[in-house]
């Protein structure tokens, strides 16, 4: 729609969409030069790691990144961590993010989230090859309940949990009707691990860790073999996913229950690899966008992710389609589509202005920016 008027109530509810002929003479209308879109959804973030910005060098590789996370986790005080969280929460809001799928390994973000203008769905993540059940995340779950924050328990990935706890935490989310968010095919090492070699395999040997899940044969087969039909699932990163993986996953879960979340700037930061954006688009799957964390990214900006996606795809994916990935698709994945993600009367979608558009080709440019209007 061009030159339309969006009318919002004081509480942010969209109450009317119109395209009057005399638009330029309407009273009480505020005009904007740019592209007006619904507020965006960051479908994968680790807000609690905001204090890690710049601490891990780019190009360290996946195993090196994991080592860097371990060595730097204890370097900041709680006060420093909380301050970084509050700042990034405010920054995301001002840049037009209305909802976030946020991974939690602790409770350091909860006080900020209780006051935030952003809706957070908290993915309380179980990981660690020494975990024998779901008990490590029980206290975080109880804190989320006490704070009245939406949450799901979820496994971290197909390579970081033994078989029993992976199945237990997945079933807990499934039985409660909550979505799972699983890091998936972020590195070559994930597939290699199931075949008995590669960086993750070597790291386990170095740390004297044994695993009991290689019999599944691959990360895809492990997910299919461990999580029931009908589960709602966000698969995060997908850097090394194949068409065969996609077909198997859709056959098991159904297309409507799967969301493939892309965080390309994080993939580039860690290993200088990029997800197969065009292949995913051509397979007509639901795609959403995330930023990952400031341990592996320069900012939590969705417009910057979209710019890189446009570059990866050589601008072959229409801007309208990419904006769906950053809005309604993410909202649907997080169960927030009843109020967010699209300009529909009765919703409270917020409004974001994107400027510096290449209007002739309807593309983002290197100078494109976004800011919240409502």
Image (spheres, helix red, strand yellow):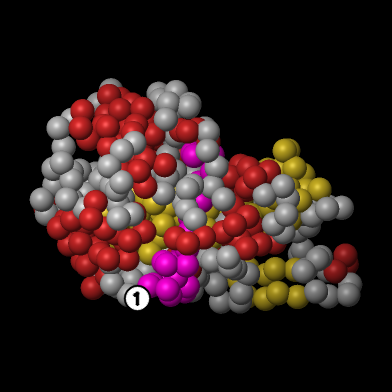
Q: Is residue 79 above or below residue 18?
A: above
Instruction: Magenta stretch: give its range.
Output: 246-267
Q: Is residue 345 left or right of residue 118?
A: right
Q: Main secondary structure of the magenta part?
A: helix
Residue closest to the eye, 241 or 346: 241
Q: Quadrant of residue 28?
A: bottom right
* Viewer-side residue, 42 vs 214: 214
Magenta stretch contains residue 254? yes
Task: Name the quarter where the N terminus is drawn.
Answer: bottom right
Where does the image place residue 200, in percent across and percent down from the top left? 30, 37
Check disc 1: other Cα within 10 Å, few if <14, some if 14-19, many if 20+: some
Q: Is residue 193 left or right of residue 33?
A: left
Q: Residue at x 13, y 47 (%)?
A: 131
Q: Position of residue 288 (x, y in %)?
A: 52, 58
Q: Give the quadrant of the C terminus.
A: bottom right
Q: How many marks?
A: 1
Q: Is residue 303 visible?
A: no
Disc 1 secondary structure class: loop
- Residue drawn at x 42%, y 30% is 61
200 vs 285, left or right, is left
Residue 254 higher or lower than 68, as above or below = below
Return the residue at label 1.
230
What residue is at 24 percent from the left and 51 percent from the top? 214
Comparing 68 with 364, the one in front is 68
Query: At x 49% / y 55%, what residue is drawn?
Result: 242
User: Would residue 162 be seen by someone viewing this image from the given angle?
Assistant: yes
Task: Using the rendered view, name the quadrant where residue 319 is placed.
Answer: bottom right
Image coords of residue 42 (percent x, y): 49, 52
């Amino acid at each position: 729609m061009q030159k339309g008027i969006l009318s919002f109530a004081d509480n942010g509810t969209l109450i009317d969409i119109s395209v009057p002929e005399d638009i330029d003479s309407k009273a009480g209308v505020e005009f904007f030069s740019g592209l007006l879109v619904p507020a965006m959804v960051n479908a994968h973030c680790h807000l609690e790691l905001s204090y890690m910005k710049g601490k891990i060098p780019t190009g360290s590789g996946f195993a090196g990144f994991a080592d860097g996370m371990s060595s730097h986790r204890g370097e900041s005080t709680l006060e420093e961590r909380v301050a970084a969280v509050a700042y990034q929460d405010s920054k995301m809001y001002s840049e037009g993010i209305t909802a976030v799928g946020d991974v939690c390994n602790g409770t350091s973000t909860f006080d900020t989230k209780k006051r935030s203008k952003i809706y957070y769905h908290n993915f309380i993540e179980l990981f660690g090859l020494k975990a024998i059940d779901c008990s490590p995340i029980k206290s975080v779950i109880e804190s989320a309940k006490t704070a009245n924050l939406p949450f799901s328990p979820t496994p971290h990935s197909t390579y970081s949990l033994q078989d029993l706890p992976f199945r237990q935490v997945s079933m807990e989310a499934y039985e409660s009707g909550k979505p799972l968010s699983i890091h998936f095919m972020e590195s070559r090492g994930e597939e290699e691990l199931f075949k008995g070699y590669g960086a993750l395999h070597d790291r386990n040997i170095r740390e004297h860790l044994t695993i009991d899940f290689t019999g599944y044969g691959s990360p895809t087969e492990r997910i299919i073999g461990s999580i029931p039909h009908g589960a709602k699932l966000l698969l995060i990163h997908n850097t090394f996913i194949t068409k065969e993986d996609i077909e198997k996953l859709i056959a098991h879960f159904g297309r409507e229950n799967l969301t493939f979340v892309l965080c390309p700037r994080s993939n580039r930061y860690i290993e200088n690899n990029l997800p197969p954006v065009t292949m995913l688009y051509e397979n007509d799957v639901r795609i959403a966008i995330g930023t990952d964390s400031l341990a592996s990214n320069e900012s939590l900006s969705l417009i910057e992710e979209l710019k890189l996606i446009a570059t990866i795809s050589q601008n072959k994916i229409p801007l309208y389609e990419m904006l769906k990935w950053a809005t309604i698709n993410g909202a649907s994945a997080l169960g927030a589509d009843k109020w967010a993600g699209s300009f529909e009367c009765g919703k409270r979608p917020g409004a974001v202005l994107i400027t510096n558009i290449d209007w002739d080709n309807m593309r983002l440019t290197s100078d494109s920016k976004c800011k919240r209007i409502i």
